Image (tube, coloured by chain):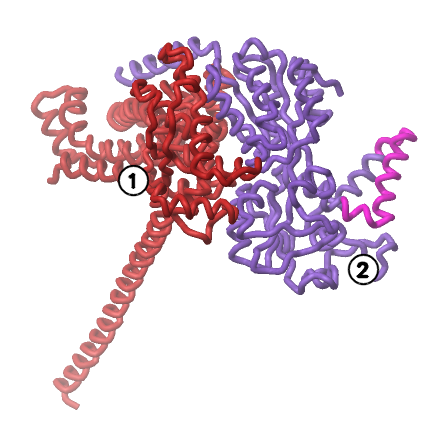
Amino acid sequence: MSKLQKAAIKRRDIREAVEQSLRARKRRSWRFRLVGLVAVLTGLLLLAIMFTSIASKGYSAFERTEVLLDIDLEEAVIDPEKTRSEEVLMRADYTGLIKTSLRKLFPQVKKRKQKRALYRLVSTGAGDQLRDRVLQDPSIIGSRVSVWLIADDDLDQYYKHGDSQSRLKDYQLQWVAQLNADQRLRTAFNSTFFTAGDSREPELAGIRGALTGSFFVILITLGLSLPLGVSAAIYLEEFAPRNRWTDLIEVNINNLAAVPSIVFGLLGLAVFINFMGLPRSAPLVGGLVLTLMTLPTIIIASRAALKSVPPSIREAALGMGASKTQMVFQHVLPLAMPGMLTGTIIGMAQALGETAPLLMIGMVAFIADVPTGPLDSATVLPVQIYLWADSPERAFMERTSAAILVLLAFLVLMNLLAIWLRRKFERRW
Amino acid sequence: MKKLRAVIGTSVLVASIGAGAASRDTISIVGSSTVYPFATVVAERFGKTTKFNTPKIESTGSGGGMKLFCEGVGISHPDITNASRRIKKSEYEKCQKNGVKDIVEVKIGYDGIVVANSRKAPKFNISRRDIFLALAKQIPDPKAPDSGELIPNPYQTWKEVNPSLPAYRIEVLGPPPTSGTRDAFAELAMEGGCKTFGWIKKIKSDSKKAKKAGNKALAKELKNHYKAICHGVREDGSYIEAGENDNLIVQKLEANAKALGIFGYSFLEQNEDRIQGSLIDGVAPEFELIASGKYPVSRPLFFYIKKAHVGKIPGIPEYVTEFTSEKAWGDEGYLVDKGLIPMPREEREKYARDAKELIPMNF
């Protein structure tokens, strides 16, 4: 065999070997891409299942059933002395008027037990609804008005979901059928859900109390953790000397970010409530506890943002004669701001969805009044979801899902804001 | 500088607010998750119909509530605690030690614990002995039940426990050990069945005898032995701890027709179209039968008032009056609509009177 032939054979072998390994490499990369795609698709599928399941369960809570009743606003009952003073109008027996109207509508109902069942078709909050109407316009006293009143949760569930989920008795169903035939039933937008605080009657329960509580808590958390976190990050990254102490601090911050949130609740109970004597269940304490929880996240994100500012910027500023403080605050900080804000917003979103640390400081509680300040007792949205999920009344199930939808909407909004801020202020080099 | 300023600003803010919070005008209530649905309804009505704020109610469990309640007197401590069992002697003593001297006890009614399954399956008719044999960790050897020998629970299906029951695998969803419902279930249902074995019952009477004879160590040992036999629940997957969320248990029962679930009567009442309560010792978990005490697995519910807070925190007597009024806890009151089993009229009158005069309990 000549030298040339040998060389040719060798070249062919090499070529084959290369081609084989190339095929294997291509297969490997294809497999990897496939695995990635499957992972993404599975994630999307699970997300879609979660969303559709929550939305399909929850959307009906945004509607409520109402009953049309003709009510004689008898002056003798509401305001026998014709004073028209607000106090008298507030205290009048509106529930009694509603009962009279129901009895007139169904004169055949005589037995005491059946009458009670009849009254139960209308919500216990209907009297307040009527009262508000009269207070708004006292001149309607003495006349006969047709009012759409909130139906009781059992009737509401039956009207919205049909037979399969009904606790109504047969005779009650007959009355409902009659009301329906007279076109005295309708569904309308459930404004109570957004304007009322918590209630043990599902048809009167709303998320306003929890939303206000969440608002105060997040406001305090943001107001404390943003300046504290950002200043700590700037000091540690730009000014602090590198020695064993700063190393220790750094390790501690990284560890704190991984501490289970309930630990912060225990800390808050010991320090803010037992030692400092702040009131239990107050959004102020909730905000302080969540500040402790989000601080490490914000510090770590802010330091990463500061680190990512290229050294050329710093050197240029220093070269132009800026002091170190001027360099940090006029050149580095503006460039690092979008990253810091993103970190902060993600920290806030975490705080918004947190329940465990709030359990320890008494914010997991039944609180019907809407809080008016950060010292009033309050609960927050995720806690409200937890409390409703545990209530025996069936109608709370759809309200649980609806509250989850509201919470998700807020979280999505906050994340969108983070993305928008990043896009708007981001600088590329 | 900026950090320093922020730190000073924060501490000043916190300190000033802390100083301003030296009074409270909302009643603070803690305690049992079983009483929670009733107390919240009363609180809501109370808030709506009076000039006082709606009381704040935390669901901490009976034990957790007692702990908070007995920690001391003052605005940072709760005014009322709810309980699904009576206050324990140790808890009462802790209260006394911490200065919580006068405690007013109010019994509010009863709660039945039901063993229920899906309506798609046949209704169970079980005895407390069946419950014990199906769920206990150790049972007396079935071949020689009186020998005093204990063996690990061998039963896999209900039919093996009692031939009249269906051949379903034993699968019971129930609350975890932290729950008052579980305590009551162990005490009333499991122990009730356990005691039907003469030699086990004898352990308890021996313990009492030893205590009388002054042998405290032996008495305690025997008592613990008795409790371990009667309250020990098997851990091989037949008893499934389903968390405190009773709604979840109801949903799981609907999905799995062969499983049984343990929860409070109010959940059965709300879901009667989907699940049915089993007969226990031949008695169905029905309103009248629980109220009359015929249904064997029912327990009293209480709340406790800190007398030292009456007059300091506005509205406590009025709240108690609302709770103990006929329109709330009476036979046709609104609490009954929520699933509370009322006490007989004379008992209601007695407790309402005691509550009104705030007569403290003594142990």
A326 vs B231, nearest the viewer: B231
Near mark 2 (Cα within 10 A), the count class, few <14, some 14-19 or many ≥20, is: some
Q: How far from the left and from the top, in percent, is residue A94?
A: 43, 24
Q: Is residue A333 left or right of residue A198?
A: left
Q: Residue at x 26, y 17 (%)?
A: B2
* Residue A255 in sight in this render: no
Q: Quadrant of the C terminus of chain A?
A: top left
Q: Is residue A263 left or right of residue A33?
A: right
- Return the residue at label 2: B142
Rendered view: A53 above or below A118: below
What is the residue that sits farthest to the right in this orientation? B213
Q: How far from the left and from the top, in percent, is residue B40?
A: 52, 29
Q: How far from the left and from the top, in percent, is residue A203?
A: 41, 36
Q: Chain of mark 2?
A: B
Residue type marked 2: Pro
Rendered view: A371 above or below B20: below
Label 1 secondary element: helix
Distance in Å between CA atoms under marks 2 and 1: 59 Å
Q: Which residues are magenta?
A: B192-217
Label 2 secondary element: loop
Q: Which chain is purple?
A: B
Asked if the stretch drawn in magenta spans residue B209, the answer is: yes
